[in-house]
Image (cartoon, helix red, strand yellow):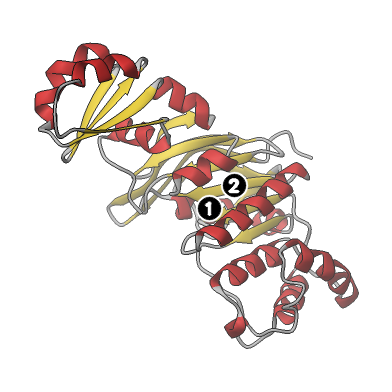
Amino acid sequence: MSAVAIDLFGVSKTYGDKVVVDGLSFTVAPGECFGLLGPNGAGKSTIARMILGMTLPDAGKITVLGVPVPARARLARARIGVVPQFDNLDRQFTVRENLLVFGRYFGMSAREIEGAMPSLLEFTSLENKANARISELSGGMKRRLTLARALINDPQLLVMDEPTTGLDPRSRHLIWERMRSLLARGKTILLTTHFMEEAERLCDRLSVLEEGRKIVEGAPQTLIDEQIGGHVLEIYGSNPHELCALIGPYARHIEVRGETLLCYAPDPEQIRVQLRGRTGLRVLQRPPNLEDVFFRLTGREMEE
């Protein structure tokens, strides 16, 4: 096994006059879940496609599982499972037939595929749907089938591009549970997402992206502690600019988002003391999250 699962160095990609990926570098260790976190248009899917050798970089170097990409992308892809952003299941086939056809792409025999199928269907909670056609499946079931299909060749690396977009909360949590199980087995996952909670729950490390550029990288909680720290108070019901001068000396940082004042404070009680006696205010206290980090560094919220 290679000492580095994925290695990007100085990778760039331009479409026309638009820079989609701008000199990006990162490494992913074996057994790690590494996230690419950013809004739509940040370049996440383009990066995933370049790692798979499906899109050619304009500059930079990519190595995947010890193999140079795109030069030997076919060899690398033999050890990679892919969960694409949009389902591309064959709707004419059943669940079982989709797995059978996909296994053949990897040169697996029918006996090998049939041998792997029961455990994959059980793992994705589809054991009772083996003979169902794709049109009979819910959105969550289709995503789970896409995951089962990605695992048919027992890959070392999974590239998961926005794997839970469009799912209801129950289906999303089930996918997360399966991803944690795969990590516990030693699989490596590259995850692209714009969901803060998803990144915080699953990623060992992540790069926060904006317009193809890396703005910060690290473990989720480390980034939150370094960039935000303390607690977040969301204050509503008054002119936020008038409150800035009042509570500013007691806050690490203050931001105004529309009619809301966000106060990052090591000691929230000091802020509450300053607000006592002021009527019409609503104060919500919560832990900081990755969206606070993104806003702190870019001046705007993460958008889907």
- Does residue 213 appear in the picture of this structure? no
Q: Earlier in the sequence, mark 1 or mark 2?
A: 1
Question: In this rendering, would 140 be left or right of 179?
Answer: left
Q: At 42% from the left edge and 34% from the top edge, which residue is drawn?
A: 289
| Labelled pair 1, 2 in contact (Cβ < 8 Å) | yes
Q: For mark 2, what is the residue?
A: 190
Residue 132's quadrant in the figure?
Answer: bottom right
Q: For mark 1, what is the residue?
A: 48
Residue 50 % position (x, y): 53, 53
Compared to residue 203, the image places residue 47 above or below, namely: below
Question: In this rendering, would 105 be left or right of 44?
Answer: right
Residue 149's quadrant in the figure?
Answer: bottom right
Dot 2 amino acid type: Leu
Q: At 35% from the left edge and 53% from the top edge, which residue is drawn?
A: 41
Quarter of the figure with the N terminus: top right
- Does residue 180 appear in the picture of this structure? yes
- Relative depth, front residue between 152 and 27: 152
Q: Badge 1 local density, few (<14 within 10 Å), some, or many (20+)?
A: many
Dot 1 amino acid type: Ala
Report how far apart the C-alphas of labels 1 and 2 lie in the structure: 8 Å
- Relative depth, front residue between 53 and 184: 184
- Relative depth, front residue between 53 and 296: 296
